[in-house]
């Protein structure tokens, strides 16, 4: 719990720090805007409108403390809303079905994690054809996954997250044809990866590990490691690091030749008095199949689900999007709460913050409002003046908040990797700029309607009778 609290404080501190830093462009904008409008006031066609708008900018600069507090509150809350909406958009993306080149996942039906006998692999990789006319999946359109994880330190007191590594045991060459995200690689990254995978295809001990995981383990390409099995207790594998997976969705994982793991399972009885490894008949975790379209998926799924070969244990076949959706079912209530409780609650709080700040300002400026009426300002003009000040704060802070958040996460950090190969890195949604602008402006407008209405109803006689 201590580490979670630490990182929570780091995130909150970072957001608040960025918000204070963003005060500089905010007040620069106010100064430049006021100066520009004052210059435009000398031109007759726009002089009255320019003077009126200039008054809004001047009023915001007159009370820097209150303006800053309202700005910071909106800034921080917009960051939260944009983050939540980006997460929801991200989940919608990864659970949406593709029209072409669908990926199907075959897993054990009744258990998580899926554990199937490796004997299933050969026929499942073909789509389980049973009779003439059945759809056969080609060898380059299938991929098996076996999960092997372990520590590079044997002594338990030395085992830690930093020396933990997690591998997909598979046919290495199929990384280039079946893994999601290959299209994101540069030509040079693709060339280097292809070279390393070719070595891993021929040399069972050769492995490719993500750049982030290598950095955590303080290892480099060309070094050798021994991985002491975590899920496969008693299976310890000596490995040669021949390549590096790029940062991002693959940054924390490794790829190894499945034959190395399966050979070690076959050899296990010879060193353990003839006893087979407990996972010897449960080593196949996933089978991925690529089908041309939804019709092809239905045919393959029907072939697999009706086959009598896969009954002990039973299997299920679903699209990748449906599989991810099933995995996310455990978080369904949390996601629902983020969408329908957290987001509206934050928007309401933002409106109340703006309403409170503007209400205090209006009460302090009742005399000023009365003077404006004496000078000839109409009630609707005073209403517009107060609404305009709130909209300026809301729109500018919302735009800067969402924009800086997007630049920081997408541009500087490069996205937040999940370390799961079928999940892309999380990024702030492309729509964040106008989300921030709209959220800031809309909540500021809603929050300032009542204070603005009371401001335009100020009675000159009531104000000056108290002065007298």
Image (spheres, rainbow, N blue to C red):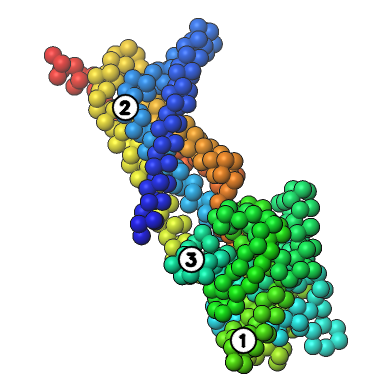
Drawn side of residue 314 relative to residue 50, left or right:
right
Look at the numbered disc 2 and give the secondary structure of its residue: helix
| Residue 209 visible (yes or no) | yes
Residue extending farthest to the right is: 132
- Mark nearest the camera among 3 and 2 is 3
Mark number displayed over residue 159: 3
Q: Label 3 to label 1, Cα distance in Å?
A: 25 Å
Above or below, 425 against 55 in this view is: below
Whether residues under marks 1 and 2 lie with C-beta atoms below 8 angstroms apart, the answer is no
Tell me which label, 3 or 2, sits earlier in the chain: 2
Task: Identify the residue at image location x=57%, y=54%.
Answer: 218
Mark number displayed over residue 423: none
**Mark 3 crowd level (few <14, some 14–19, many ≥20, 10 Å Cα):** some
In the picture, the quarter occupied by the C terminus is top left
Task: Identify the residue at image location x=80%, y=75%.
Answer: 137
Q: Nearer the viewer, residue 352 or 331?
A: 331
Q: Label 1 to label 2, Cα distance in Å?
A: 74 Å
Q: Position of residue 274 (x, y in %)?
A: 62, 93
Q: Label 3 to label 2, Cα distance in Å?
A: 51 Å
Tell me which label, 1 or 2, sits earlier in the chain: 2
Look at the numbered disc 3 and give the secondary structure of its residue: loop
Identify the image quadrant of residue 317.
bottom right
Mark number displayed over residue 65: 2
Task: Identify the residue at image location x=43%, y=41%.
Answer: 14
Above or below, 356 against 130 in this view is: above
**Mark 1 crowd level (few <14, some 14–19, many ≥20, 10 Å Cα):** few
- Mark nearest the camera among 1 and 2 is 1
Identify the image quadrant of residue 74.
top left
Above or below, 116 against 27 in this view is: below
Q: Position of residue 176 (x, y in %)?
A: 76, 61
Q: Which residue is mark 1?
A: 271
């Amino acid at each position: 719990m201590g580490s979670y609290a630490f990182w929570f404080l780091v995130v909150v501190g970072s957001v608040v720090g960025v918000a204070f830093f963003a005060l500089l462009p905010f007040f620069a904008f106010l100064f430049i805007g006021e100066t520009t409008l004052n210059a435009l006031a000398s031109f007759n066609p726009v002089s009255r409108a320019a003077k009126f708008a200039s008054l809004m900018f001047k009023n915001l600069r007159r009370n820097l403390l209150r303006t800053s507090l309202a700005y910071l509150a909106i800034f921080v809350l917009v960051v939260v809303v944009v983050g939540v909406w980006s997460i929801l958009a991200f989940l919608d993306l990864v659970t949406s079905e593709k029209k072409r080149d669908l990926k199907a996942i075959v897993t054990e039906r009744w258990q998580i994690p899926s554990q199937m006998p490796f004997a299933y692999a050969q026929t499942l990789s073909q789509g389980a054809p049973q009779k003439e006319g059945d759809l056969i999946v080609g060898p380059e359109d299938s991929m098996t996954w076996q999960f092997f994880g372990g520590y590079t330190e044997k002594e338990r007191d030395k085992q830690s997250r930093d020396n933990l590594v997690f591998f997909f045991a598979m046919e290495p060459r199929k990384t280039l044809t079946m893994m999601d995200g290959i299209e994101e690689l540069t030509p040079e990254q693709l060339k280097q990866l292809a070279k390393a995978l070719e070595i891993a295809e021929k040399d069972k001990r050769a492995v490719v590990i993500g750049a982030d995981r290598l950095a955590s383990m303080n290892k480099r390409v060309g070094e050798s490691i021994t991985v002491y099995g975590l899920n496969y207790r008693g299976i310890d594998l000596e490995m040669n690091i021949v390549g590096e997976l790029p940062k991002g969705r693959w940054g924390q994982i490794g790829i190894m030749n499945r034959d190395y793991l399966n050979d070690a399972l076959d050899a296990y009885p010879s060193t353990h008095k003839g006893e087979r490894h407990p996972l010897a008949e449960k080593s196949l975790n996933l089978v991925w199949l690529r089908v041309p379209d939804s019709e092809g998926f239905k045919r393959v799924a029907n072939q697999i689900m009706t086959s009598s070969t896969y009954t002990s244990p039973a299997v299920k076949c679903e699209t990748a999007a449906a599989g991810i959706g099933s995995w996310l079912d455990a978080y369904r209530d949390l996601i629902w709460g983020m969408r329908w409780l957290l987001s509206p609650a934050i928007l309401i709080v933002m409106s109340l913050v703006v309403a409170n700040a503007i209400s205090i300002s209006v009460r302090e400026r009742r005399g000023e409002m009365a003077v404006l009426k004496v000078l000839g300002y109409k009630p609707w003009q005073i209403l517009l003046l107060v609404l305009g000040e709130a909209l300026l704060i809301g729109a500018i802070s919302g735009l800067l908040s969402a924009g800086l958040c997007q630049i920081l996460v997408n541009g500087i950090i490069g996205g937040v990797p999940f370390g799961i190969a079928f999940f892309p890195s999380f990024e702030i949604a492309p729509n964040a700029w106008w989300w921030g602008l709209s959220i800031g402006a809309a909540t500021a407008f809603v929050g300032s309607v009542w204070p603005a209405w009371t401001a335009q109803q100020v009675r000159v006689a009531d104000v000056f009778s108290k002065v007298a």
